[in-house]
Every structure is written in C-alpha cells, then in structure tokens.
C-alpha cells in the first residue's frame, strides 16, 4: 500500500526502444565484440605474439595458420589488425570525450548566460574554427611529438565546435522553458538550473554527439596515420597498415590492407547504425506526451 | 436533392501504439445537413479531431486505420475512393481550417500566392484570373487593404487576419463542407467573435455546411444548429442545439454544461463531471450557497491588510537599437501599473494576448527585472533585494504556469521535483522527512503518494497541474501567481483545479494573483478584478461589480464579445 511504484524514466524507455530495434541490438553486439577483443589483446590473452618478427615468414598469403597472411616482417596480419582495435578505441573514446566535455561546458555557459559571455565564447570558437584542422594537428605533433595521446588531444581540441553550437542553442531554448523559470521562482541558483535541470534534458544530445564524434575520431586516426601524422611507428594501427599497403598493393599483396579496411568498416558501420537507432530512441519529439 | 450532405455510418478508427490498440473512434454515426452547422463537442482525447481527419481521409497510416464504416458524400462512399479521386474531393468539396493559423500557412510564400495556388490547382484558373479571385476572396473575408495584403507574408499578419486568410483559402473553391477544427481557440475573445460572425456570413452566402469542432460549449451555442457530443470515442448525445442546451439527457453532457464557469450563473463551487456520472445528475446539496454570498462574506475592504503593493511598475523591452547601441524604440509591455493585493484574497488580472498581464506577473516575482517602479511585499521593496535576499523571498512567493506539460522537468521524478524546493530552502531534516512531506503534499492536491517515483510523462494534464500546485506549496508560500493556470485544461478538469485552488486558499490562507484571458473563470475565482489593456490597468473593481457595471469601454467590449451560450 505505502510501497511506492517504480517510475518509468525516459532513459529506461529509450533502452526499451533500443532493445526492440533488431539492427541496434546486432550493432551493439558488434561493438561489444570489438571492446572485448581490445580488452583481451591488451591483457595479452589473445594474439600475444603480434609484435614477434620472423624474416622467413614475410608476405605469406592467407592460409589456415595465418587467416590474413603475414606482413613484411612476417607478423600475423590478423593479430596486427586485432591489436589495431585498441588504438582505434583509445583515439575514438578520448578524442571524442574531450571534444564533448569542452563543447558541452562552453555551450552550456554560453547558451545559459548569453550576453557578453556568449559573445566572448562565440568569438573564441569562430577563431578556432577558421584554422584548418590538419594544419592544427601538424603543429600539435611538431610541438608535442607525434603519438597516440597527442592525436587524442589534437582531435579533442579541434572537434568540439559543432557540438558546442548544438548545446548552446539547446541551452538558449531550455533557459526560457517554464520548468526552468519555475525552478528560478523556487529560488534555485545558476548551477542547479544548469546542471540539475537543463543538462539532463539535453544529455541525449551529448550522448549522440559523443557517439558521432567517436566514429569521426576513428576515421581521423586512420587518415592521420596514413598521412604519417598519427601514432608512433611500430604501434599497431589500421591507418599504418593501410599506409603500408599502398606500396604493397602494386606487388599483389592485398591482404594487409584488406584486413585493416574490413576491421574499420565493421566498426564504423556498427557505430553509425547504432547512432541512428540511439537518436530515434532518445528523441523526445517521437515520444507522445 | 436530399437535405443531407454527408452521412457517417458506423465509423471506427483505431491507432496502434506502444501499449496496444486504441479505439479512438468507436462505430459512430451522424449526419451533416446541407447548409447547416453541426457542432462536434468533446474534451481532449474524445476523438473529435480524429473524426474530422477521417472524413478528409487524412488519418496518418500507420499508426492509424479506419477499420469500419461509411462516409457518404452525395451517394458516394469516400472510403472507397482512390487516393487520386480523394485529392479531387479535398479542397474542392470538403475543405478544412485549423486551430493554429500560423503553422497552417507556409511562412516562405505570400498569402496571395498560397490562396492562388489552391485556385490554380483545383479550378485550373490562369494566373491572372487566380489573382483577381484571390483579391475578391480577401475582400470577402474582411482583410483590410487586400491590394497590399496580398503581398504580405504570414508573419506580417495578426492572428485573426491569418485565420481569415485560412478561411479564404478554404472557401476558394466553394466547398460543400467546411471542417473547422477549433478555429478560434488560439484567438482572443473579441477576435473570436469576428471570426464566428464571418463564418456565419459566408455560410449564408455560399450555402455550405460547416462541421465545427470545439471544446467550448459557449461557442457551439452561438454558431451550431445541431450538436454532437463525443466522449472517449463515442457519441453520447446528439440533437438540435436548443434541445441539448435546454434539456441535456446524458449525464456527461449535463456535467459538461454545469462545470463551465459562466457569467450569469453563480455557483459557490463548480460541479464536476464525475458528480453527474455517479449520481445521475442529481444536484449536489452542498452547493446552495451562491457565489455572491461567498463573495459577500469575503468582501474586500480598505481595512484588510495589504500583502503586495505594486507601485508605478514599468517594464519596457528595447525594440530597435541604434548603430552605436543606443535604444531607439521600446515596447511598453507594462506601463505604469499600480495595484494592491490583499492578504487571503484573489486578484484577477484579465486582458487579451499581448496586454502585458504575463509580463506583469513575472515582474512581480522578478523573473523579469522591472524597468521602473516599486514592488512592496509587506514592508520590503523586493526590487531592491540582492540575490540572497531574493532567494529567501522566493519561499513566500510562488508561481503556477499555464502549460503543465512544459512546467515540469521531464527527467525528474515527481518526488524529486517536490523535494527540490525543500532542499533549496532547507526545509525538513533529511531525505526521510522530506519524502514524508512530499507524500503529504500529494495527498493535499488529491493524488496518491505511491506515485512519487513516477515521471511527469506518466500523468495526465490535470494530474500534472496538481503536481505543479503541490510543488508551489512545497515551500509553504503565502502568495501564489497563477499564470493562465487552467487555460490549457479541459473544462471538466478546469473545474476540479479551480475548486482545489479555492479549497487550498481557505485551508492555508493563501493570496492569489490569478492571470487569465477567460473572464468567466476570473469572475468565479477572484475577489477583485483588474482589466489590462496595452500595458495599463484600465479598470479595477470587485469581481461582481466589474461584470454587472463595467465602466471602461474596453471592459464593455470584452464582456460583449463572450459567447453567451443558451
């Protein structure tokens, strides 16, 4: 009798919608597979010998022992590609997370306070936005040295602008809503209004943007490594494998590039389709009031 | 030619939702006679709009589906027509106008282009002919300066003018049936009257039938010949307007008629529909004391202690800025208003949209900073308070908004929403006690405390408005501003909420400022009424006096525009 009933939050509702979407479930399984693979590789439980070179086994075509053949140093291509997952996930996660944190924070205060603060931040972002992204990363790697974490930092510091714009306009919109005005009338201060009221109502966008940013960061890593601006040589990376393949392909050695491309293809596809499902599930406009 | 234009027989419409199939319309039958107006009345969710969309065959599929029935127009069942044939019917034989004229017009085309498009499409007129006809139509619907207005974009017109343009588009092809879906709900009463008159004139001229859909019984009594009352997808009663208003048969119709505050009836409390549904229409005996008596026992006199005094308050918004940042033009939303609110009483603030009543309400709470003037709460001038002082003051003053869907944070449980004000103001000594207090508040507004863990979207509109009231009460305030707090609710729910507000006032000695555009509601709930026009208070008197003996021209105009009912 006095026992209170469990409420149905919009988050639980979104998960319920996601679970009903078969494509989303399959994509989620693929993403979990990649995460598991990366974890097992990092722990050394699978493909422990990915870095062991063997001159005699160089450029072996795919076979029962080596599903995707071997590379110039006789390393198992499959093992290299599997370990490349770690690099991709790190870049995707940290690159995107940094961008989302910066974008959300600046967007929130610019949109919420408006006025001079808004103008200052807008001026700042337009300035950042005018610098070509590749140029900025090149200068970053000159100053800090090329490497995995430099790349994360560079990606994060350059890709927050789009996210900032979305959050800023959301905050401007929500600031005027009755429920925020009501909180003001109750005596709630600025931090409470920003973080307890408006942020949870825009958090679905944060989540979607993080996920979108993840995909672009994964792709950016591959492109940058291909251009030689990415990870240190020797680190297993899909971009490095594709970069090496550009010379090998002419000699008919197709398996290294193919493995890296397939690995990347399935990860990006899974994330992109999952994003669409996520957006549908979280979109409050779809929800009947 | 028979005198029935459309026969609707056994029409059913189903919607597929997450929670299963909903029968939005259940095997309904009614006729629309030629040249007459049929009023379709019902509250939200009664299926009245779905019925009209079904006649136009515009039910979105999926999720909706017409599962059975016939809609016969001139011997032809519309449900058997192909989509191409149906396009010939829409706009040509049946046309439709909607509630919100702004969203029904395309903002990037001029109104002339939009009307002409209909003519070119359906009547295959040449551009020149269409233009001439458009001008003629705009003149007919009473748009001033049609020569110039034809080149206007929708945003350059007022709400009433936009609805006129919609009507011009709808009658462009001289349809046999005009479906009007809440065409005046978004408009002020004075504009509403003009639009209703216009529809009646056009009907006479073209001999068309009108299906008029509304929740407002007053409007129906003014315009309709026959009335169909819908309740939860069913027709509960139909008959001529005379019959229905004089001798309603079904308890729901009786309840609906009784629970609407009106200018000439003076009940002490509003009856609610459920009274009629359970006791089969027996008048409640506890309702004998009239509104007049209630007001007399609560007469407002100068001796009564003053809670709030608004002195020469102005709020001006900058409209145009000069090149160097200087403001060139101002909108005077609130222009030199002086008002007194007495403790334990209700001050009604009426006026049409844009008169500044909402701005004044928010200025009193300093949700908007006043440009000039003093707001004395007891002995403190709250315009001079700093942030900390204002925060403490907010405990005493609360606000209840119009839209219960927008005023609750959708990501917060009801319990969290009720406890938040206690946390801010340090009421209660911990989670347990606050939870207990939140439970008490739920009981006070007539809800079950077991619902505390639920989220706003799990409640109906009326329940949400109760939650908003509970939240305002959480800080034990003395003074509450109700900003159109019942305007978004169905009449039956509106009656419940108004009764609740009265009970709470009595119980907790609350003082209200009640802002509304609805004069009948304001008369019912207020002790004193102030009429606002163009940012100024033009008249103020006690609630009975202002209706029986209006002084200012604007007040008279406002009162005469209200649909009287039968």
Image: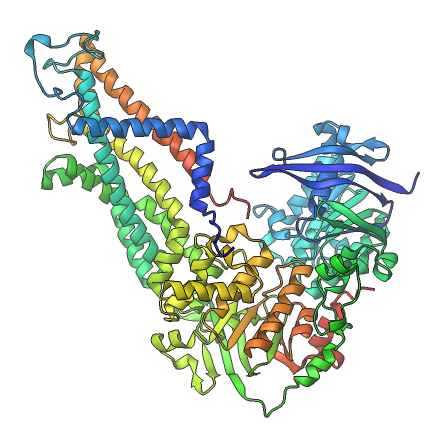
Q: How many marks?
A: 0
**In the picture shown, does residue A157 fall above or below A258?**
below
Coordinates of residue B315 in the picture (x, y in percent): 49, 74
- Judge by depth and name the residue closer to the eye, A249 or A256: A256
The percent position of residue A227, horizontal first and vertical second, equals 18, 28
Residue B453 placement, left or right of A140: right
Residue B140 in which image quadrant: bottom right
Judge whether residue A226 can be spotted in this image: no
> Would you say B55 lies left or right of A34 here?
right
| The quarter of the displayed image where residue B70 is located | top right
Foreground residue, B548 or A52?
A: A52
Residue at the left extreme? A55
| In this picture, residue B504 sits left or right of residue A109 | right
Q: Position of residue A190 (x, y in %)?
A: 35, 64
In the image as oriented, which residue stretches furthest toward the right?
Answer: B1
Q: Nearer the viewer, residue B500 or B220?
A: B500
| Position of B234 relative to B290 (above/below) | above
Q: Residue at x 47, y 83 (%)?
A: B377
- Please, which residue is most extreme toward the front here? A1
- Does the rendering let one see residue A83? yes
Residue A131 x, y percent position in the rendering? 24, 43
Residue name at image x 79 percent, y 61 percent: B281
């Amino acid at each position: 009798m006095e026992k209170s009933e469990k409420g149905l939050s919009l988050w639980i509702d979104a998960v319920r919608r996601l679970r009903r979407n078969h494509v989303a479930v399959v994509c989620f399984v693929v993403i979990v597979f990649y995460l598991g693979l990366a974890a097992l590789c990092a722990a050394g439980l699978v493909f422990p010998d990915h870095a062991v070179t063997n001159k005699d086994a160089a450029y072996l075509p795919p076979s029962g022992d080596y599903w995707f053949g071997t590379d110039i140093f006789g390393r198992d291509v499959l093992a290299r590609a599997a370990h490349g997952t770690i690099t991709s996930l790190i870049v995707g996660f940290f690159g995107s997370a940094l961008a989302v944190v910066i974008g959300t924070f600046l967007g929130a205060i610019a949109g919420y306070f408006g006025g001079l603060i808004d103008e200052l931040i807008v001026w700042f972002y337009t300035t950042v936005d005018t610098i070509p992204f590749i140029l900025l990363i090149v200068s970053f790697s000159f100053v800090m040295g090329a490497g995995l974490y430099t790349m994360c930092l560079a990606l994060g510091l350059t890709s927050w602008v789009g996210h900032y714009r979305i959050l800023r306009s959301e905050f401007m919109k929500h600031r005027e809503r009755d429920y925020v005005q009501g909180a003001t009338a109750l005596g709630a201060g600025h931090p409470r209004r920003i973080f307890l009221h408006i942020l949870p109502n825009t958090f679905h966008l944060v989540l979607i943007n993080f996920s979108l940013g993840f995909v672009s960061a994964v792709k950016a890593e591959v492109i940058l490594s291909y251009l030689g601006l990415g990870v240190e040589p020797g680190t297993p990376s899909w971009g490095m494998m594709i970069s090496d393949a550009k010379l090998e392909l002419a000699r008919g050695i197709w398996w290294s590039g193919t493995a890296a491309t397939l690995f990347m293809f399935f990860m990006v596809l899974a994330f992109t389709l999952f994003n669409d499902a996520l957006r549908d599930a979280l979109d409050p406009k779809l929800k009947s009031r | 030619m028979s005198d029935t234009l459309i026969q609707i027989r056994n029409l059913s419409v189903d919607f597929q939702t997450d929670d299963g199939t909903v029968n939005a319309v259940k095997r309904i039958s009614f006729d629309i006679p030629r040249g007459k107006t049929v009023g379709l009345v019902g509250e939200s969710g009664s299926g009245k709009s779905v019925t009209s969309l079904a006649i136009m065959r515009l039910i979105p599929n999926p999720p909706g589906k017409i599962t059975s029935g016939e809609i016969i127009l001139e011997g032809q069942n519309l449900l058997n027509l192909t989509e191409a044939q149906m396009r010939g019917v829409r706009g040509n034989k049946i046309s439709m106008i909607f509630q919100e004229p702004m969203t029904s017009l395309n903002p990037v085309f001029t109104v002339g282009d939009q009307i002409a498009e209909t003519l070119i499409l359906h009547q295959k007129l040449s551009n020149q002919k269409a233009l001439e006809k458009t001008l003629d139509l705009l003149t007919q619907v009473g748009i001033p300066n049609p020569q110039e207005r034809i080149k206007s974009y929708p945003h350059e017109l007022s709400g009433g003018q936009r609805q006129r343009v919609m009507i011009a588009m709808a009658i462009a092809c001289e349809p046999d049936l005009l479906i009007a879906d809440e065409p005046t709900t978004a408009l002020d009463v004075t504009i509403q009257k003009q639009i209703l008159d216009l529809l009646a004139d056009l009907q006479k001229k073209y001999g068309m039938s009108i299906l008029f859909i509304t929740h407002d019984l007053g409007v129906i009594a003014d315009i309709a010949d026959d009335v169909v009352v819908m309740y939860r997808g069913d027709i509960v009663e139909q008959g001529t307007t005379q019959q229905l208003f004089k001798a309603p048969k079904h308890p729901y119709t009786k309840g609906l008629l009784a629970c609407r505050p009106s200018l000439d009836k003076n009940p002490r409390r509003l009856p609610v529909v459920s009274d009629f549904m359970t006791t089969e229409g027996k008048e409640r005996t506890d309702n004998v004391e009239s509104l007049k008596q209630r007001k007399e026992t609560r007469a407002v006199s100068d001796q009564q202690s003053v809670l709030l005094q608004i002195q020469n308050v102005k709020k001006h918004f900058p409209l145009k800025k000069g090149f160097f940042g200087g403001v060139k033009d101002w909108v005077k939303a609130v222009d030199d208003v002086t008002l007194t609110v007495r403790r334990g009483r209700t001050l009604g603030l009426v006026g049409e949209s844009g008169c500044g009543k909402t701005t004044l309400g928010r200025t009193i709470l300093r949700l908007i900073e006043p440009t000039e003037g003093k707001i004395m709460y007891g002995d403190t001038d709250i315009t001079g308070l700093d942030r900390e002082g204002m925060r403490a003051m907010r405990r005493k003053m609360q606000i209840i908004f119009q839209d219960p869907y927008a005023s609750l944070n959708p990501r917060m449980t009801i319990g969290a929403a009720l406890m938040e004000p206690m946390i801010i103001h340090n009421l209660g000594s911990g989670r347990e006690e606050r939870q207990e207090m939140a439970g008490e508040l739920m009981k006070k507004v007539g809800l079950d405390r077991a619902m505390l863990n639920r989220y706003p979207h799990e409640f109906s509109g009326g329940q949400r408005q109760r939650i908003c009231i509970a939240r305002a009460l959480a800080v034990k305030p003395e003074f509450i501003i109700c900003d159109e707090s019942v305007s978004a609710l169905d009449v039956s729910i509106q009656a419940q909420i108004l009764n609740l507000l009265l009970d709470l006032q009595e119980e907790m000695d609350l003082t209200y400022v009640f802002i509304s555009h609805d004069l009948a509601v304001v008369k019912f709930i207020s002790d004193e009424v102030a009429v606002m026009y163009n940012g100024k208070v033009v008249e103020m008197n006690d609630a009975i006096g202002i209706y029986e003996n209006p002084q200012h021209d604007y007040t008279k105009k406002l009162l005469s525009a209200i649909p009287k009912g039968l």
